[in-house]
Image: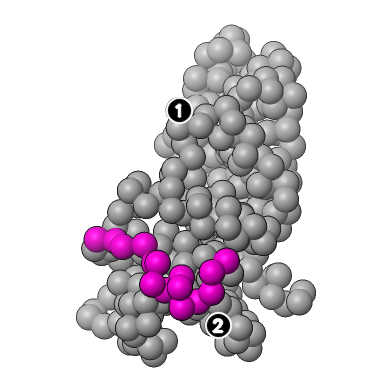
Amino acid sequence: MLSFVLVAAVSVAAADDEKPKDLVEKAQAALTTGRHQEAIALATKAIQLEPTNARAQLILGSALEALGKHTEAIAAFTKCIALDPKMADAYDHRGSEYFKLGKIDKSLADFDRFLELNPKARPAHWKRGIALYYAGKYADGAKQFKAGDKVFADDVENAVWHYICNAHVIGADKARDAILKIGKDKRVPLMVVYDLFKGKAKPEDVLKAAKEGKPTDQELKERLFYAHLYLGLYYESAGDKKRTLEHMTKAAEEYKLGGYMWDVARVHLERVRKK
């Protein structure tokens, strides 16, 4: 850790005489390669030299986002938007960060603004679909996931989120009949999860499938995370609050992962507990 800090410090010190443009390029390179602390230092230096540099704020926010500093990331994206209201990516990133804080309405507003500026991204914007579900806008959520049908042709998750939105609109039986068709999702145990929502498998089949074979400890953790996440959603769609809480707790706490879907499980659990 000490050597990393020294390297980052030397990199920034060497950048003292550089122009903001050069600092921004180096900050972007650091962000792209996962050197988030260095990206923060370089972007901050660029902002000090050129406070109106919107791209530097975007990079700063993205690095803070990667480190889980949600409030600080939102502040950087907000400054970016103030400097350049048409910086589409800033709305998209800020929308993600608002979601992670459970601020669903703000998240959705940012995703919608992002799509106004970048309409071609609409079919693939599954994050917006999830936000619509938590906003209680189930018909719009079903439309969002339906729009992603071809983009996510082999993705069980897109089909399941479409189902749980659609079940609120047309009922569970009709939603099951209308479940999106997919190809082969290679992630274990997601094909069994798909069968569960189609009515062709039982909850215990999902957990059994997750443990089959000889997965590494990390692979098993990932499998069980997704198993419990989607079992929680399955039981919620069936109105079983007790089992929803049980499985979401396991997903968010016992099988904690990084990544956006873990944040979904965590936000879901917080909402269930409040209710």
In this rendering, which labeled residue sits more in front, label 2 or label 1?
2
Q: What residue sits 49% from the left and 45% below the top? A: 125
Q: Position of residue 120 (x, y in %)?
A: 45, 32
Q: Name the foreground residue: 228 vs 221.
A: 228
Mark yes or no: residue 220 visible: no
Please state the extent of the stretch shown in magenta in the rendering: 169-183
Q: Which disc number belongs to residue 29? A: 1
Give the labeled residue for mark 2. 238
Mark yes or no: residue 20 visible: yes
Query: How dense is the environment of label 1, judged by Cα within 10 Å: few (below 14), some, or many (20 and up)?
Result: some
Does residue 88 belong to the magenta stretch? Answer: no
Q: At numbered mark 2, what does the secondary structure look like: helix, strand or loop?
A: loop
Circle 2: residue type: Ala
Q: With 252 as the anchor, is 107 left or right in this view? A: right
Q: With 181 as the anchor, is 10 left or right in this view? A: right
Identify the image quadrant of residue 204: bottom left
Q: Name the foreground residue: 183 vs 249.
A: 183
Q: Position of residue 72 (x, y in %)?
A: 72, 42
Residue 109's place in the image compared with 199, above or below, is above
Q: What residue sits 59% from the left and 9% below the top? A: 19
CA–CA distance in space, label 2 to label 1: 47 Å
Residue 199's place in the image compared with 80, above or below, is below
Q: Are marks 2 and 1 in contact (CB under 8 Å)?
A: no
Circle 1: residue type: Ala
Quadrant showing the C terminus: bottom right
Q: Position of residue 142 (x, y in %)?
A: 51, 57
Q: Name the foreground residue: 171 vs 40.
A: 171
Q: At numbered mark 1, what does the secondary structure look like: helix, strand or loop?
A: helix
Q: Earlier in the sequence, mark 2 or mark 1?
A: 1
Q: What residue sits 72% from the left and 50% below the top? A: 105
Q: Position of residue 252 (x, y in %)?
A: 57, 72
